[in-house]
Amino acid sequence: MNKKILLIFVPLFSINATVAKTDEISELKELILEQSKVIHQLQERVEQLETGQKLKEQSLTQRIEEVAEKQKETPALPDALKWAEKIKISGDLRFRHEHIDTETSGSVKWKKGRDRQRIRARLMLEAIINGDWDVAFRLASGEKSILADEGEMFADPVSSNQTLKQNFSSKDIWLDLAYFHWHPASREGLNVYGGKIKNPFYTVGKNQLVWDSDLNPEGVAATYAIPLGKRDTLHITGGAFWVDESSSGVDTSLWGIQGYIKHALGNPDYVLAGVSYWDYANIQGKTDTYGILAGNTPDSTGSKWASDYDIIEFFSEYGTKISSMPVTVFGNWVKNTVAISGEDTGWLIGATLNKAKEPGSWELSYDYRDIEADAVLGAFTDSDFIGGGTDGEGHRFGLKYQLAKNLQAALTYFHNEKRSSGRDYDYRRLQADLLLKF
C-alpha cells in the first residue's frame, strides 16, 4: 500500500523545483509521513483482527471436538451399579430340524424315518473378581433321565438338545458350567480352571472323535502356552476329573495330559502337531448305571465295562489361505492301549474351507472317521455320528452361512455305517440349524 501512495504523489515531484516553495515541499513530506504512519497502523489493526479470528475459530473447533468425544463416551454408572461393569452376559439359541434314517435287520430293511424339532438354549454369566481371577456360570437346556433303581435325575453329558414333544410340556434347565478361572498376570500364558469346566484339550479342526463338543468335564485343569522363539509356541494341558463319585466304593476318575507345538510358517500359514494321553481309573468292571456304554464292549452281565481305557492320541493340523479363503486340513489317530478286544483304534481326517463370520460369508467342512468299539469311551464321543457312541465309520458334511450379525444357518449330513452283530448297518442323519447369539 505504501508504494501506491508514493505513486500518487510522484506527479507532484515532477513540478518545476524552481517554482515550488521550500515550505510547501516540507509540508508535502510531512503529509506523506503522516499518511504512511496511518497506513501502518491500519495494517497492524487488520493483522490483530485476523489473529483474534483464528484463535476464536480454533477454540470453537476444540470445543466441538470435546463435545463429540463426550457424546461417544459411555455414561458413567452410579456407584450402586458399579458391579455391573464386571459382569458379562452372553448366550445362544439353536433351533434344529432333524431327520434320521436307520437300516435294520429282519424283514424291514429300513426303520421308518424319524423327524423331530429340537432346541438348545444356553445363558452364560462371567464375572471379573480381580485382575487375576474370574468366575463363570452357564445354564443350558437338556433332556431329563431318571435312574430306575435310585430315582435320581440326570441330563445327557454330551447333548444340551431338548426335543419338542410331550404335549407342550415345560422343559428342563440344568447347570451346564460353573468354574473359576485363574490367569495370573505374573505368569503370562498360564490358565487354571476348576469346577464344571469347558473341555480344556485342543481338538484339531474342532472334530469330535474323542470328545463331543457339548461335553463339559468336572474337576481341575491347567493350560500353559510357552513361546519357543518368534515362530514356535509350546502348548501344554493337564487335568484331573471325577467321572463318577461313589459313596460306597472307589471313584471313577480321568487323568489327562496333552502337548503340541504350533509353528508359524508365515502369515497366515501354520502347522501344529501333538500328542495326548488319557487314563481312566477304576472304570473296568464298573456298572453302567446311566446306560451309556454306547458301543463299548460289555462284560458277561451286559451292564459293566469289560475293558479299561488308557488312550493315546496323535494329531496334526495345517492352516493356510487359498484366494483369501482360510483353509484347514487336519487329522488324528487314537488307540486304547489296554483294550480287552482288538477293536481298539480310531482315526479321522478332515478339512474346512472359508469362515462363516461376516454377513454373507460361508463355510464348508468335511471329515471321515472310523472308530472301533473300544478305541475311546463311547459315553463321551460324538453323540450325532452313527447315533452316538463307538463302532462305526463314515462321512460328515457341513455347510454354514452367516445370514446377518449373530445369526447363522447350517446344514449337517451324516452318511455312516454302524457295526453290530458282525455286520454294518447304514445310518443317515440330516440336521438343519438356525443359530442366534447374543
Image: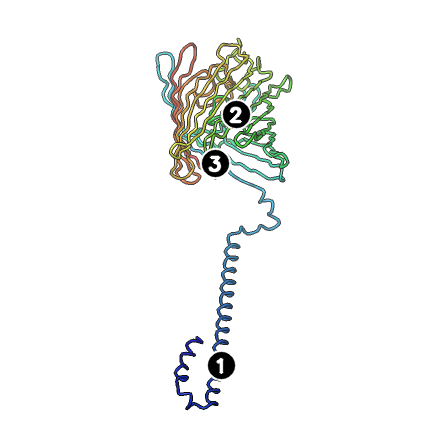
Do the numbered discs 2 and 1 sit on residues whose CB atoms are within 8 Å? Answer: no
**Element marked by disc 1:** helix
Q: Is residue 428 among the parts visible in the rendering? A: yes
**Element marked by disc 3:** strand
The percent coordinates of residue 415 (x first, y second) are 38, 21
Q: Which residue is mark 3?
A: 92
Q: Amino acid at mark 3?
A: Asp
Q: Amino acid at mark 1?
A: Leu
Residue at image x 64%, y 36%? 186
Q: Quadrant of residue 369?
A: top left
The percent coordinates of residue 305 (x first, y second) are 54, 13
The percent coordinates of residue 426 (x first, y second) are 38, 17
**Element marked by disc 2:** loop
Q: Which residue is mark 2?
A: 157
Q: Which numbered disc, 3 or 1, marks the residue closer to the eye?
A: 1
Of callouts 3 and 1, the N-terminal one = 1
How packed mark 2 is, by other alpha carbons closer than 10 Å (few <14, some 14-19, many 20 or more), is some
How packed mark 3 is, by other alpha carbons closer than 10 Å (few <14, some 14-19, many 20 or more), is some
The percent coordinates of residue 401 (x first, y second) are 39, 34
Q: Which numbered disc, 2 or 1, marks the residue closer to the eye?
A: 1
User: Is residue 304 found left or right of 105 in the rendered image?
Assistant: right
Q: Quadrant of the N terminus?
A: bottom left
How far apart in space, not on screen, are marks 2 and 3 (Cα)? 19 Å
Q: Which residue is mark 1?
A: 33
* The disc label shown at residue 370, or none: none
How far apart in space, not on screen, are marks 3 and 1 (Cα)? 87 Å
11 in relation to 349, above or below:
below
Q: Amino acid at mark 2?
A: Pro
